[in-house]
Structures are given as C-alpha cells and as structure tokens.
Amino acid sequence: MDDGTASRGEVLLSVDGLTKSYGAVRALKGVSVEVRRGSVHAVVGENGAGKSTLIKIVSGAESADAGRISFDGAPVAMASTNAAMGLGIATVYQEPQLFADLTVAENIFVGREIVRGGRIDWRAQSERVRTLLADLGLPERYADRQVGDLSVAAQQQVSIAKAMAGEARLLILDEPSAILTDNEIDILFALVRRLVARGVAVIYISHRLDELFRVTDTVTVMRDGDIVGTYPTDDLSVREIAEMMVGHELANDRPDRDAPDGEPLLSLRGLGRGDLFHDIDVDVAAGEIVALYGLVGSGVDEIAKTLYGVERPTAGTIAVAGRPVDVRNPRAAQRSRLAMLPSDRKHQGVFAFQSIAFNITTGHAHRFRRFGFLMDRARENTVAKDLMAKLAVKAPGPRTPLNALSGGNQQKVVLARQLVERPDVLVLEEPTQGVDVGAKEEIHRLVTELAEQGTAILVVTADLPEALRIADRLVVVRQGTTTVEFGPTARQADVLAAAAGDTGSEDAA
Amino acid sequence: MNAVTTAARAKDRAPGLGARALRALVTQRLVLLVTLLVGLVVVMKLLERGGYLVASYSSDYLAASLIDAVPLGLLGLGQLVVIVSGRGGIDLSVGSMVSVSGMLFGFAIGEWGWPLVPAVLFALLSGGLLGAINGFFVSAMGFPALITTLATYYAYSSIALVVNDSSPISTGPIQDLTWLTRPVELPMFGQYVPDFPMGIFLFAIPVIVLLWLNVTRGTYGRQLYAIGTNDTAGRFAGVPVGSVRFRAYLVSGMVSGLVAVVTVSQFASARPDAGTAGNGMALPAITIAVLGGVAITGGVGRVVGVVVAAVLVVWLNAGILLSFEGSEGSQYQLLALGGVLIFAAILNGVTTRRYGGTS
Amino acid sequence: MTTTAPAPARSTMPLLSGRVTGQELVLLGVITLLWLALGVSTDTFIQAGTLSNLAYNVAPIALVGIGMTVVIVCGGIDVSVGSAVTVVTVIVAKLVRDQGVSLPVAVVVAVGVGALLGLVNGVLISVGRVHAIIITFGTLNVFRFVALRIFDSEQVAGVPGTLAVLGGGQTGETLHVPHAFVVMLLLAGAMWWYMRNTAGGRHLYAMGGDRLAARLAGVKVQRREVLAYVLTGVLVGLASCVVIGGGGLIGQNVGVGLELQVIAAVVIGGTSIMGGRGTVLGTVLGALLVGTVASGVTILHWPSQLTSLFVGVFILVAVGTDVVRERSRRRA
C-alpha cells in the first residue's frame, strides 16, 4: 500500500542505557531496547518492573536521568508529549482521551482542522476520516457520530485512528485489551495487524501473556527496572515468559503461620454482576488470609466493590458468619461487619486536607456521638492515637493534616479507618499500591496480625509476590470468574501462567 | 523527612517573624478578618477624630448596626453549609425562600392571629420545606445546584408574589413585632455596655451556637466536610452522602425561614419581595461566606470565620454610611462588597497554590 | 486495495446531518403549541402589536444570551451582565442626552464600554484563576457601583430618540418587525455558524468538555476564555442600545436581574451548565419561550408573577433532560 513494507525490519526506535529514579527508587537501571518497523513489540513485566516508566519516557511524558533515544536513525530529545507526537510517536491509553460532545471526525482533527475560507471543510475532513477508518477496517459510519455515544471499545478504536491520522510511525498501546471483551479484542488485533502491514511499529503493553502469541512478534521482558531479554515471540511459551518475569524464586520470607480452617466467616456463592464477573465462589475462615489474584481486566477489582456495596450484585449471595447479608451500600456493609480498603487512595480513600483523626473517624459517626449529635472529640483523639500507634503512623499528632504525610502513612491512616469498628471481614484492594518498601513491610505485618486476632481477610491484588507472601490461599480470577486455587508455597511462575491464560498448568495446584 | 511533603516542609524552615505573620494573615482566615476588623475600627475612629464623619462611629452605633448582620450572617452560614457540602454546592434561592416564608409568617401573625412562637415555627417549617425541594433535586436527582436553585429562585419568588397578590402584609400585630429587632439594655450589667438589638439574642446567637455545635463540633459536620472534601471517598467510608447533602439544603431553607421573621419584624411588614428586591439576598450571603474563608470547591470553611466576616462587612457598611452624605454611602457599600469578594477569592486561590490551603 | 464506501444513509457533514438538536426541536414544538393555543384562545395574541412587542422584549435577553452561551459552553459563567447593562446604558444615555452624540458614535461607545467590562471579567477569571461565578458576583457589585455613581442619584430623563431605530416604537420597526430582533437574529445566526463551522468555534466545545485535553491539543484556552467574556461584553453593549432605544427615561434599576433571565434562556435552550454542549439557536428559542410565556400570561390576564413560576419549571425540565441524557450515555 505504501513504502512502509519496503523498509520493514529496520530499527525505528532505539533506546540506549536509559536510567530514571524517583527519589530513592530506581525505576530504570540502564535499559536498552530496539523496536523495528512493521513489528509488534510486546513489553511485559510485573507491576513495578519499569514498563510504564519506559513508556512515559518514550512518549515524552517524562524525561530520563541518563541515556540516549534515537528515532529513525537520528538522536532525539523528547522534551514533551507534543514533541514526541511531532516525531510520529503516539500513545493510546486505556482511558480514551477524547471530547465526548464532538464527533469522531472532529476529535481526530481537533487542533489541526482542515480549514477553507475560514470555515472547517467538513466534507474534506469527513472524507479523510472515512478513508482512514476504512483503511483501518473500522466502520465508516463512526465518522459523524458523537464520541460520547460510542462504546468504550469503539472509543479506543477512535483513539488509535486519531493517532494514525497524525501519521504515527510508532504506536504505543498501553494495556489496550484490559477493558475489552473477547470479540472486541479480535477487532483490535485485526487493526494492529493492518497497521503493521503498513510499516508502523507497535509497542504493545499487556499483562495477558496468552494474547502475546496472537499478535506480537517480539517480546521484551522487564524485571526490577532492567531488561531480562528480548526474544522472538514464537521462541517462547507463556510459561517461559512468566518464569522470566518472576526471575529466580526468592526464598519465601512469609511468616510461619498455621492456616486456620474453621467455619467460613465470609462466603461468596455464585456472585456475579452483569458481564463483569460471574459465578464467584470463595470462602474465608476467621483468621485466614485469602488472596484473589487476577490481571487487569479480569474483573477482580469489581468483585471487591460489589462485596462492599459500592455496586450491587446481579446474582449470587454474600454471607457473613453464615448469615446472608444484603449489602446495599457501604454503610450496610459496615453494619454487616465488613470493611474495605479501596485501591485508589487519592480518589476513594483520603480526605486530603483534613486531619488524621478526621480521616480515621469519618464514616463511623455513630460510634463517636455524644448527646445524640456532638462529636466526642476526646474519644476521637484516643481512638485515633491508639490506631496511629498500632499501625505505626509517623506523624506529629492526630490533628496533622493528612496531605502532610507520605503515601505509606496515608495508606495506614485509610487502613486505620477500616479498623475502627473491628470488622469481622476485611477486604483489602491493592493494599500496598504506591507505598514505599518500609511501609509495605509494615502493612503486611499488620494484616497478618489482624488475621491472628480472628479477622477474615480477603486481599484483592495484582501484586503477585505480595499475594504469595501474606495469603494462606490464593484464588486466581480469570475472565470474570474464579478458576484455580494455589497454596502459599506455589511458585510465582505457575500462578502467573494460570492467570495469564496458560491452561496447561491449571492442574499445578 | 520522606514522610513530610513540601507544604509541611515550608513550615519547618523556621522563617522570620515577619514571614510568619504574613503567613498567618493569608492562611489563617480568622487572623486576617480580625486584623481587618481592628484596622477598620481604628481607621474610622481616626476619621471621626479628624471630623470627617457625619455622625459618631460610637460603640452604640456599632451595636445597633449589628441588626443588619443578623440576616446577612445567618444567610452566610446557610451558604457555608451548602457550599461546604461540595459538588458545586450553592443556594441562589435563599432570597425567594425568605420572601415566601416571610409572607406565610405574615399571614400567620397578621391575618390569622397566631401567637408568635407557633408563627415562627411555621416560618421555619415553610423555609425547611422549600429547602428540602432544593435538596431533593440536588442530592437525589443529581441536578447541578447552581441551576436548580436558580430555577427555584424563580418559582419561589413567583409564589411569594402570587400568594397575596403582590401586596405586603403590615397589619397591627406585625407592626407590634419591631421589639424583636430593636436595641435593648441588657439586665444586670446593661449600663456598662451598649444596647444590643434583641434579634442578636433571639435569632443570631441561638443559630450560631446550634450551627457551630452541629457543623464544627457535631457528627453531622464531620460527614458534611467529608463529602465536601471528597465525595467518592465519603461514599467508600460509609457516609450517607445523599442524606448529608440533602440536609445541607434543608438547613439553608430553615435559616431562610428564620431570616424571614427577622426582616418582617425589622421592617414591620411582610413584603413579597423582601428577599429578592434589588440584587437579592443570595449575593451578599455568598460574599460573606467566601470572605469568611469558605472555598467554593467545598470542604473548607468555618462558622466563626463567616460570623466575623458578617460583622466586618456590616461595620464596614456602617462606616461607609457615616463617611458620605446621602445615598453615596450605599453606593460605596456595593463597591466594598464586590471589591472585598474579589479580593477574598483571589486570596483563597493564591493561598491554596502557595501554602496548600486556608484554615 | 480500495474499499468502496457504502452510500451513507445520512449526509456526511454535521452541518447537514444534525442541523438542529433534539432539544431545539422540542423547544420549537413547545413554542408552536403555545402560539397556537394562545392564538386560538385569545383574540389579541396573534396581532402585530403583541408579537412585535414580544420580539422586542426578547431581543436584549437573546442578544446577551448569545454571549452567555459561548461563555457557558467553554466552561464559565457570567452573572455580572445585568450590572454591565446598567453601566453601559447610563453612560450612553447620558452621552446621547448631554453631548448629543450620533447613532454610530453611541453604538461604538456602547460596544466599547461593554467590551471593556467583559475584558475585566475575562482577565480576572483567566489570570486570577478563580471560579467565574465568584469573580462575576464581585464585578456585579462593582459595576453596579460604577453605574450608580454615574447616575448620580437621578434617573436619566429626556433621552432623545437617537437610538429609537433599535427601540420598540414605530421608528424601531419595519413591517412590524423590530429592528432589534432582526439584529439579534443576524448575530445569533452568525455566531451559530461560527460555533458550528470554524475551528475556533469547535475549540470552545473542546475547552468546555475537557480543558486540559484541549490545551494539549493546541487550543489557546486562556485567550479563547478572555475573548468569550469580551464578546459577552460587546453584546451587552448592543443590548443596552436596544434598552435605551425603548424609551426616554432610564431608571436606576435598568438591567437589574437580567443575568438570571439570560441564564434561564441559555439553560432552557439546552446548553449544559457543565460546559461543552449547547447552541446559540437553542438560546434564542429559550428566550422566545420565556418571552411567549410572559406575553401569554399578560394576555390571559393571569397574575404576571406566574411567569417566574413557569420559568423555574422550564429550567428544571431542561436540566432534567440534560441529566438523564448524561446518565444514559455513561451507562452505554
């Protein structure tokens, strides 16, 4: 179709010795990689391996501390996302960044409209977009629809079309399949193949290892800010990729504890919500820590929200201590002695400019009520100080504003809020996301302690080492439902392979 | 060190006294307001000494002028509650709620011959009902507060006018109510202090105390500030978000009902346009709230700040009235109100960006 | 490889495919029904005098509404327009009466002063980075102060008919159509075209939808924002000319409360208060609806105060449809 096919195989992007540190954390330790024209190049690695940092630097969103980038044979300085786009490097994020009230054609041309005589040339724009959509195998009728009226999958396709309209030569897809259904993924892959045929290079980020074999030709595995290796996809298996991502197994330093097996305190039977997840069966006994492990898009995060009444289930039952409970809203969940630590601390967890005590006691008004309406400030102080000591929150006092604390300490405060009413069941969603190593250790220790005091704990996480370290049992969620179960001595590579869709290892448990 | 962000670090740098004073002035809204209040009185006293005033800026004059702070301050507190509740909270309809409640109060007292206490309760109730309608649309239906209360502003003002064919009620029983707002000598130590208007004790202080107890010291206040600071986190924490926000608008309505009683007795007449004449009452109330340190984005603002801001504006207005002959004074009051609002808003913005917020 | 495009069922251009939105059609329907009902039930509604009076009354609200639509679409609001009208009206009325300035000069001064007031708003909002409603609440008071100082405690009486060509009397009409209404329609049409068909116009919607994303796409957000307020000021100037043309006596309360009527017209016209959606055509229809109701209430000898009640209900219905639409969209 164009000369792209002719130059296929040449190196388009070359990254050499890239380093980047955030404070004391070394996110990239001298990364070198080459991406070729006409290639779909997967970058895989566990959370924190450095994938997203690498992508941010290549797309101009952040700058590296050291290292060289060259594009199309010439060294380039990626000063901003606009500079990167100018070169022909476009990134499509999970959440489509489009204007809902403008049409698809307008979205594609916003900021660089085709203008004739002061007026937007609708016909030319529309025709260009139709040609573009047809080229990409997308429905031409999208062109004049308002973006807000399209499905999420269609919006993602539009984002890709928009990148291509800007003559992108390197397209970065950041976990594009996470929000899509199987059918939509097929359409996405067809689109990616068509782009590659035109000589575009694609960097494909995904957690779902099984799909790499369907669409990528090269895989780069990252671990701890380093590159483990770059291989032709066909030379590897899901299992081998998983092994490389995990590296040599560390001696599991999980504390010695006897897994209790009493009557289940929390028990989910056939729980489902719409097409997000279905037939979830999980039991957690008093004093037990169970991890629900699933990749982004597996529906695992939606399970936690449903348990806690943020969303309502459409099927199945939730029972606490043998009694079925109707969790209409978070308050009802609390009354059923359920508590949940949300994953998105900034949006769902903290009251940023309020005090630590405020953050701990909010939502528990009825426990601090005096004379029917007053806040018992003395009691509040005692409870806050108590929990701050128990959770080792480092702060001058309970009246310190929360936004003066580090991420780890903020997380401990939000966790403290869940403990005010001594819940029977504690759901922890990504309990150590965005906290430093020290705080992570402390949170793990706390969770174990809570379990020892008889709380049933369900950890929902995509952090596999964490899950294996603290959980007594690990249940894998894949494609919206519970699949295999592993014990605490399971190998990371086995679990990862199971979650990523390597059906061959399902009997590993 | 890692545990402390930049905002707190700035505090650790141990700046000089001047810098600390400046910091307190711009970040502690109460410090600023009290400083302005003292400065205002000093300047007015100097002007008086120099013979520039048409009458004495005396303590009696200041005490008597406080009656104007009652409606202003109470409605400012109503705005505090709805603005703090977040998600673009605001109540433009307070003026019409005052008009409607005032007319109903006027009917009860002036036409139906009700005793005072049930009539006041009636006014409170009617204000509460109107506020509940606002609250229903905003919290249950998710309508934007600005437009909802604009719509009810229209609807309520129409009701106030229609209910008595646009004419005021000023029968004998209503004219007898002026004692509610007139200055009185306090018992026991009354001769040592100026005479304060009765309305201060009957309306302002009880409401201020009640709101302070509930909003600053009460469990309701905790929930209110929580949803105003972060609506989603409030939901995840188990705060009944809808009910808390609904009650904020209910409070604004009830406060309007009480203000209606004050204005009716102050003017010895229940006027159908009491709250909507001119620019209405919502605007000054919002100004007082913002000046008092309420952030329009929600979750920030203190009862004491709004009360001091109301006193500051009323005494500033009183001073301006003495500084000019005729109607010029009331014109300069507009300039002062607008200027002070813009000043306070820009100050709020600057402090948020530079110091991480006002308290 | 060439794909033959299937013949599109609808025209390819937004200009043709969705020339009017659903809300506009509904409004048009409601207005038509009201006119029919009033025409059938009264003898006086379908009369040149009534209708031209209606058109004249709608003109200043719709004129300012054009600017307000732009401001709200790009994510702001301006509650100071009423006071701005007071300022421009008193300045121009005094100039016309005391200096005897001509029509063109009067219009230029009105537009200039209006633009200046809009510039003050725009700069304070854009540079001060403060919420528009707070700033314009403040300037509402300051502008009113300025106006009252110029009034100097007296209404402006005996204004000559220099601007009567834009007024509501005989000179202001051609074939019973008020010139002010025609001017408004022309400007609204121009603005409607601009917002639909030019890059600058579309950028207003982008800004209101997602300010940050718009800036990243290369939209000059701050400049457009300031210009939106200046445009509103210009239209305030024209609306003031229409007001002066209406009569020889300018009272001190001229323009008071106009901002609420204008915002009501804009919201009823389907513009989302959250920004990013709305059309000038809708605003004109919204103003016409409000005007029709006011006129109908008068003709039916209902208490005139009922108009506000209807306006309030219309606003709630308009916002309700907007909210429902957003919700169903998010679910999709």
Image (spheres, coloured by chain):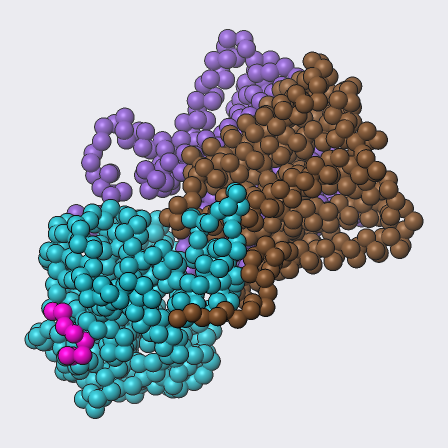
Which residue is most to the right? C43
Expressed as whole percent of the image width and height from the top left, the position of residue A83 reads 28, 48
Q: Is residue C256 above or below residue C151?
A: below
Which residue is most to the bottom? A507
> Tell me, what hue is chain C?
brown
Residue C84: say if magenta: no
Please give the name of the residue rendered at 43% of the width and 31% of the height, measured from the top-left corner: B33
Please give the name of the residue rendered at 65% of the width and 49% of the height, measured from the top-left corner: C281
B32 relative position to B168: left or right: left
Does residue A448 appear anywhere in the picture? no
Expressed as whole percent of the image width and height from the top left, the position of residue A32 reads 12, 60
Chain drawn cyan, letter?
A
Chain drawn purple, letter?
B
B310 relative position to A294: left or right: right
Give the quadrant of the C terminus of chain B.
Answer: top left
Please give the name of the residue rendered at 70% of the width and 36% of the height, measured from the top-left corner: C183
Q: Which residues are magenta?
A: A229-236
Q: Is residue C131 above or below residue C254?
A: below
Does residue C238 appear anywhere in the picture? yes
Count of labels shown? 0
B301 relative position to C174: left or right: left
Expressed as whole percent of the image width and height from the top left, the position of residue A234 reads 18, 79
Q: Nearer the viewer, residue C178 or C291?
A: C178
